Image (cartoon, helix red, strand yellow):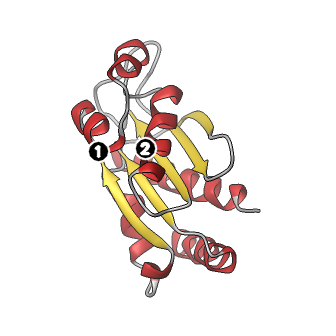
Amino acid sequence: MGSEPDIRNTVSRLADRLVELGVVLSAAESCTGGWLAKVCTDLPGSSAWFERGFVTYSNEAKQEMLGVREETLLSHGAVSEKTVVEMAVGALANSRAQIAVAISGIAGPGGGTPDKPVGTVCFAWAMEGREPHSERCRFDGDREAVRLQAVRFALHGLITLLQ
């Protein structure tokens, strides 16, 4: 699914904008398991604008690799806007990138709660010199569909940030 024409086109638009601005991207992913990094690096020449990806599926990985605070995880959970903001800020701090995106969600089929049903995904975008922006979405479909929609949404958010 990651090589779908719409995703390829979106990544190509993102790449053009990043190169135009001389900005490099890093990604911090949980529920998407590196899918965003994969679609970015599917594009030849992506090393010019994609610096690294962090797949931080466990809370411990989020803390160790990105500096997410234990208090944030205990108070708000891994799937929260507060957590993804810390993930995105941590991705900037632990890379040479000037822009970062973070994704954490509940792709299913289990793991949902009344507060955070399956399909809940939180996103954050951080860019040097700007306040991070976060958003919480709810996507429909099975695990694959939720993850694909999350990757698309994260990519579109990056393009919007760079406009």
* The C terminus - image quarter: bottom right
Looking at the image, which residue is at 57% across and 34% down?
137
Q: Name the foreground residue: 117 vs 140.
A: 117
Looking at the image, which residue is at 38% across and 52% down?
94
Looking at the image, which residue is at 39% across and 75% down?
41
Point out residue 104 in the picture as x, y percentages from the top left corner: 41, 38
Residue 36 appears anywhere in the view: yes
Q: Are marks 1 and 2 in contact (CB under 8 Å)?
A: yes
The amino acid marked with disc number 2 is Gly
Numbered disc 2: secondary structure: helix
Label 2, residues with CA under 10 Å away: few <14, some 14-19, many ≥20: many
Question: Relative to 109, is 114 on the left or the right?
Answer: right
Question: Relative to 63, is 134 on the left or the right?
Answer: right
* The N terminus - image quarter: bottom left
The amino acid marked with disc number 1 is Met
Q: Name the foreground residue: 123 vs 51.
A: 51
Query: Which mark, residue 99?
Result: none
The number of callouts visible is 2
Q: Is residue 108 above or below residue 19?
A: above
Point out residue 17 in the picture as x, y percentages from the top left corner: 67, 74
Point out residue 150 in the picture as x, y percentages from the top left corner: 49, 48
What residue does disc 1 label? 65
Numbered disc 1: secondary structure: helix
Looking at the image, which residue is at 34% across and 15% down?
74
Q: Earlier in the sequence, mark 1 or mark 2?
A: 1
Residue, far right: 163
Q: Quadrant of residue 76?
A: top left
What residue does disc 2 label? 90
Question: Relative to 47, is 34 on the left or the right?
Answer: left
Q: CA distance from mark 1 to mark 2?
A: 8 Å
Label 1, residues with CA under 10 Å away: few <14, some 14-19, many ≥20: some
Q: Is residue 66 above or below residue 101?
A: above
